[in-house]
Amino acid sequence: MPTSSPSSPPVTTPVAGWKRELATAVRDPAELCRLLDLDPTIGSRAVAAGRSFPFLVPRGFVSRMRPADPADPLLLQVLPQPAELDDVAGFSSDPLAERQARRAGGLIQKYAGRALLLLTGGCAVNCRYCFRREFPYADSGATPAGITLALKELAADPSIHEVILSGGDPLLLDDPLLARLVTDLGAIPQLRRLRIHSRLPVVLPSRITPDLLATLAASRLAVSLVIHANHAAELDDAVATALRRVAGSVPLRFNQAVLLRRVNDDAEVLAALSERLIDLGVSPYYLHLLDPVIGTAAFAVSEARGRELIDQLRRRLPGYAVPRLARERPGEPAKVWLA
Ligand code: SF4
């Protein structure tokens, strides 16, 4: 039976709210500065500085920034700064040697027993300190064909027990595609765990849809979610609601933060982040030292300062609320724990 006729309205698939929000994200640093009542010269400097990595920030994330404050810790994470264009010794395009760790399609294996599956190069926010800001996604295998190849490779390798969905941001894939992928991964007998690394629950909490939760809850794999927040101000009421809903379907939830100069290199700020995460049922898992990627040097904090901060956190918080200070070194069999 036809579902429409020339006289009836066309049948359309409703666009999910999170996609609408993403479509209206701010893509011009000058507009962001106008929205926040910042001096227009900050906006023009940011436009010039943003040439090397596109600017993108959802309006819900902007609403958590303090107006008229150029030092706001959320703003500093996303606003291009002139220093990004400086060439700094020790900062390169692939400091983690991820290109050498590629296997078939979008599959990257750095450590024993687990592998990363890159699903897309896109994100809902472009963080200026991003360790993959120089990653060549166009030929990374993060495509439907690359994913098919990666699934075949996984099926043929009995040594891999855990798959980590990564990107870009894997939750940018829409619900039907993710559901099919989770089903396909569940059909590989040697896989036991599925981990999802995503910043979307923080920057676009409407992404936590009932369909996504149903997919994760139905998988035979043990599913964990690793979110990425660097400051307690990122975790507003909408994020809290989304994370509480996730808790019903995903038993293990962790946060990874990056230690960033002027954003969170302060014991009080880090303690507030840990306490907020624990209140929301999320374990503060890692505090990463910055990976030295071109354009990010202004965010770097020394290893000595990182250890000092962890020591201060230990004096204030219960052990389970203190993240591990970690750094990734290419060629090491695991992340290096520094404190
Ligand atoms: S969300 Fe993650 S992958 Fe995307 S830009 Fe930020 S740090 Fe990079």
Image (spheres, grey):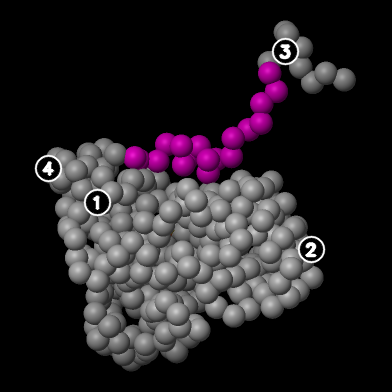
The dot on residue 41 is 4
Callout 2 amino acid: Ala
Magenta span: 10-27
Tell me which numbered mark, 3 or 2, is placed earlier along the sequence: 3
Measured Cα–Cα span from mark 3 to mark 2: 42 Å
Quarter holding residue 84: bottom left
Q: Are marks 2 and 1 in contact (CB under 8 Å)?
A: no
**In this figure, which residue is indicated by the disc labeled 3?**
8
Report x, y in % for residue 306.
29, 82
Alpha carbons under labels 4 and 2: distance apart: 55 Å
Is the C terminus in the top left, top right, bottom left or bottom right quadrant?
A: bottom left
Circle 2 — which element? loop
Assign a secondary structure to mark 1.
loop
Q: Earlier in the sequence, mark 1 or mark 4?
A: 4
- The dot on residue 313 is none
Callout 3 crowding tier (Cα within 10 Å): few <14, some 14–19, many ≥20: few
Left or right: 282 with respect to 184? left
Dots 1, 4 in contact, CB < 8 A: no
Nearer the camera: disc 4 or disc 2: 2
Q: Nearer the viewer, mark 1 or mark 3?
A: 1
Mark 1, other Cα within 10 Å: few <14 / some 14–19 / many ≥20: many
Q: Is residue 199 magenta?
A: no
What residue lies at 23% left-to-right and 66% top-to-bottom? Answer: 297
Q: What is the spatial separation of the Cα atoms under label 3 and label 4, in whole angstroms? A: 52 Å
